[in-house]
Image: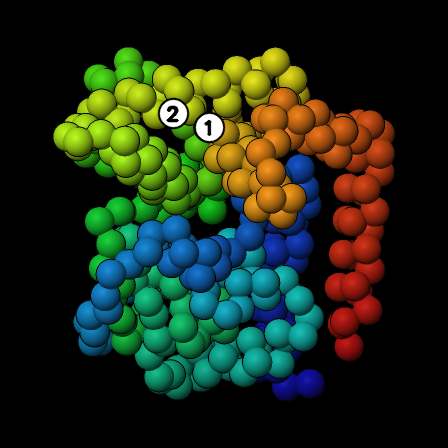
């Protein structure tokens, strides 16, 4: 083995070990060590259009995700799998020999960057402590700006908080209802609520000669639709089965499921009956849920090991 080959082998092993150690450190919260999927962020932010920005010098610490290789690298772009070794060392060799590499290709979204092409080049650069990299950039326009260093869960919370601010500001929901805790654990739900209110407004107006105001529709929906459903959720203690969800999450889910049942059986089903069914379906003993989770982890690890050459 030549001196250069020995160096690239050592460089890769160091980077790979950092990824393994990072995974061990975040065993209880694996998402914190996971590279972010561009498609996940795009789905949340719903950018309106693309703008070609051309060649730029990009800070590597603002490259937080990948379009297609987010399973291969950890959140710091260190290689997680041995099958990346050959390509990684080839890039490392070019750095050692001071060979100019073509620029990488990036998407910019929410003020952060995601790799379209060049994941290995970013990984090697991070391992060598390089701070900037040449990139060909396409920007996707969004009003939401994300923070570098956050994991997907924190970015998701940023998006939800932004959606809540917009919903409350545009509808005046809080002042109308005096209810400021319409909170969700997943993005996109405030649009669902807004559509529920519009539908409620439509059905009320069917029996009136003069159209009611949006303020009246919001207050009516809140008092005659939302709060009664929440009371059923509380009465049947459904939140005990979904501790990571909010009551507004469960409202949306229960209404959706209730509508599906009414369409399936072509009859009006009491909401309490739906709540009873949900309790029966999802009340798994804690030990069984824990056992299922352990079996999933073991199966995943076994699949990963079998896939390595």
Q: Nearer the viewer, residue 64 or 243?
A: 243
**Image position of 89 with respect to 225: above or below:** below
Q: Is residue 176 above or below residue 191?
A: above
Q: Helix, strand or loop at disc 1?
A: helix
- In screen coordinates, is 156 left or right of 78? left
Residue 210 in the image: x percent, y percent?
15, 30
Q: Is residue 272 left or right of residue 45?
A: right
Q: Are marks 1 and 2 in contact (CB under 8 Å)?
A: yes
Residue 164 visible to an observer of this rendering:
no
* Residue neighbourhood size for the residue with mark 1, other residues' Cα within 10 Å, grouped as few (<14), some (14–19), many (≥20): many
Question: How many numbered markers are drawn?
Answer: 2
Label 2: how many residues lie within 10 Å, few (<14), some (14-19) or many (20+)? some
- Which sits in the foreground, 107 or 27? 107
* Disc ID at residue 15: none
The disc placed on residue 182 is: 2
Q: Quadrant of the C terminus?
A: bottom right
Residue 137 in the image: state x and y as whole percent: 27, 71
x%, y% of residue 176? Answer: 23, 18
Mark 1 and mark 2 lie on one chain; the one further toward the N terminus is 2
Quarter of the image with the N terminus is bottom right
**What residue is drawn where x is 22% and y is 23%?**
216
Judging by the rendered image, the residue that carries numbered circle 1 is: 248
């Amino acid at each position: 083995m030549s001196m250069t080959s020995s160096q690239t082998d050592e460089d890769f092993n160091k980077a790979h070990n950092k990824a393994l150690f990072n995974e061990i450190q975040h065993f209880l919260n694996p998402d914190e060590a996971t590279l972010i999927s561009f498609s996940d962020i795009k789905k949340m932010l719903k950018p309106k259009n693309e703008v070609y920005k051309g060649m730029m010098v990009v800070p590597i610490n603002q490259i937080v995700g990948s379009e297609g290789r987010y399973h291969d690298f950890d959140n710091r772009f260190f290689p997680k799998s041995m099958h990346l070794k050959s390509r990684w060392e080839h890039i490392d060799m070019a750095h050692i020999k001071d060979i100019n590499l073509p620029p990488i290709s990036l998407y910019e979204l929410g003020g952060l960057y995601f790799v379209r092409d060049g994941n290995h080049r970013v990984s090697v650069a991070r391992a060598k402590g390089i701070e900037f990299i040449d990139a060909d950039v396409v920007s996707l326009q969004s009003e939401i700006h994300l923070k570098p260093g956050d994991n997907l869960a924190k970015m998701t919370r940023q998006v939800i908080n932004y959606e809540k601010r917009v919903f409350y500001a545009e509808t005046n929901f809080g002042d109308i209802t005096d209810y400021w805790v319409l909170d969700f654990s997943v993005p996109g739900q405030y649009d669902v609520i807004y559509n529920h209110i519009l539908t409620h407004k439509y059905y009320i107006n069917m029996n009136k000669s003069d159209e009611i105001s949006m303020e009246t529709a919001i207050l009516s929906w809140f008092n005659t639709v939302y709060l009664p459903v929440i009371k059923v959720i509380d009465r049947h203690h459904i939140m005990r089965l979904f501790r990571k969800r909010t009551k507004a999450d469960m409202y949306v889910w229960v209404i959706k499921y209730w509508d599906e049942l009414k369409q399936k059986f072509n009859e009006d089903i009491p909401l309490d009956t739906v709540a009873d069914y949900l309790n029966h379906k999802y009340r798994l003993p804690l030990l069984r849920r824990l056992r299922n989770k352990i079996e999933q982890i073991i199966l995943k690890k076994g699949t990963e090991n079998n896939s390595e050459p």
